[in-house]
Amino acid sequence: MTENKNELMEKIVSLCKRRGFIFQGSEIYGGLAGTWDYGPYGVSLVNNIKNIWWKKFVSDREDMYGVDAAIIMNSKVWEASGHVSGFSDPLVECQKCHHRFRGDQLEDKNKCPDCGGSFGEERQFNMMFKTYVGATEDETSVSYLRPETAGGMFVNFKNIIDSMHPKIPFGLGQIGKAFRNEIAPRDFIFRSREFSQMEVEYFVNPKDWKDSFERWRKIMLSWCDDIGLDSSKVHELEVADADRAHYSKRTIDFEFDYPFGRKELYGLAYRTDFDLQSHSTASGQDISYFDEESKERFIPHVIEPSLGLDRTVLAILCNAYTEDNLGDETRVFLKFKPSIAPVKCAVFPLLKNKPELVLKAREVFGMLKKEFSGVVFDDNGNIGKRYRRQDEIGTPFCVTVDFETIEDNAGVTVRDRDTGKQERVSLEDLVSYIKLKI
Ligand code: GAP
């Protein structure tokens, strides 16, 4: 990693903290490794991503059903899915400083990167967080925080068939938290111990899996475009047999060029009938599907587009971070797609000490607030400073009320974040002007 790439990540992490996007988890107590908290702008960014995902992957489609399953599930779910026995990473411990590392991520497997000491034998470390449900703490009350949201959808397959009577192909979609006790959480929110996933489990007739896989592949690429990721930074990787998860017969990883390297952003997997078959055997329930037309009964196969929410946030932030010269000044701005931006527009009175300007600006603010979520009012400091503050959080439009607004009924100025250019827009046209650009 070059110095520059390190510096860029440092700038992004620092902006996120300074401007209320992302904070270290439990910060006032020194933090808790692998946990992060979203602040006000962070949570708006997250909600915008979730809403756009939900619309594209679930609510706009007739073949998709949303679910929101419990995070703590019966431990038999994770025994059947293979996670209890196989969801592990190779762990090595330095015999001198006792620091622990993921064996497969070490550049030199014979030397501790922290103290130069040698390692003990590699062992498998299960990444699920174990807990106990109820007042007894013994093997009968063991449960796990889910390591993927997928499990909650597989165990509800029968409920959906019985309540919604869908025809195959159909899918379930869910957004929620997942937990993994990562040996080495790193790279800001890229690899954390608590994170969110946006996942689809799409159930198909086994003969159709290839077509369905191809369709979802294209949808995932178009999603990257929807959220404004530069397509030259998104790459597909056919995952080799030896590197695929235990349940997958084919996986494509979608990688993104993060400042710290090209790394996995999303995965698309062909999970066959592995999960439904395993849950059917382990629970003793019939989890098959009867096709009325062909009179066939079968266990559906699954195509799974799996998208990490936090890795999406990080890709969007890295993609958007821009430094340029505007006028005589260097500035930092986040070039978010307007639909993703936490704040859509900011409203300013040109001068703070002119009550008539403030009153009118408040009126414009109220009008815009009714139409858009993410509108702020700012009368603090000179106008240049206000523009810089909004640039830094990626606000696409700044609306200024000046004397011409009140004296000549000449509308307001709308300043474009990326070009810095200002346009006069009448008050009647303001809402539709902004709507057209979002
Ligand atoms: N249900 C399939 C599944 O969970 P995965 O490749 O292990 O597959 C899917 O995870 C996605 O979840 C990844 O592509 C990534 O976006 C996100 N993800 C996985 N582990 C993560 C972690 N420790 N921190 C943040 N995101 C993570």
Image (cartoon, helix red, strand yellow):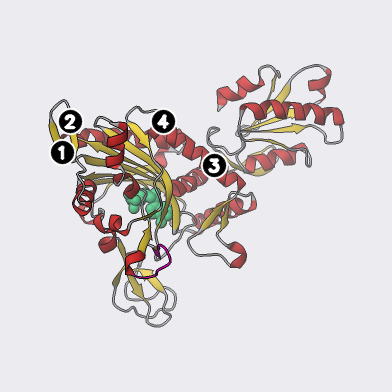
> Would you name the residue on which mark 4 appears?
59
Q: Are marks 1 and 2 in contact (CB under 8 Å)?
A: yes
- The answer to whether residue 217 is visible is no
For ligand 1, tell me if the residue under mark 4 lies within 8 Å. Answer: no
First in sequence, mark 1 or 3: give its number.
3
First in sequence, mark 3 or 2: give its number.
3
> Would you name the residue on which mark 1 appears?
298
> Would you name the residue on which mark 3 appears?
45
Q: Are marks 4 and 2 in contact (CB under 8 Å)?
A: no
**SS for callout 2:** strand
Report x, y in % for residue 385. Answer: 73, 41
**SS for callout 4:** helix
Q: Quadrant of residue 108?
A: bottom left
In the rendered structure, find residue 291 and report the number of the disc placed on it.
Answer: 2
Residue at position x 59%, y 62% in the image: 27
Give the magenta part as a residue range. 131-138
| In this rendering, the label closer to the viewer, 1 or 4 | 1
Q: Are marks 3 and 2 in contact (CB under 8 Å)?
A: no
Quadrant occupied by the C terminus? top right
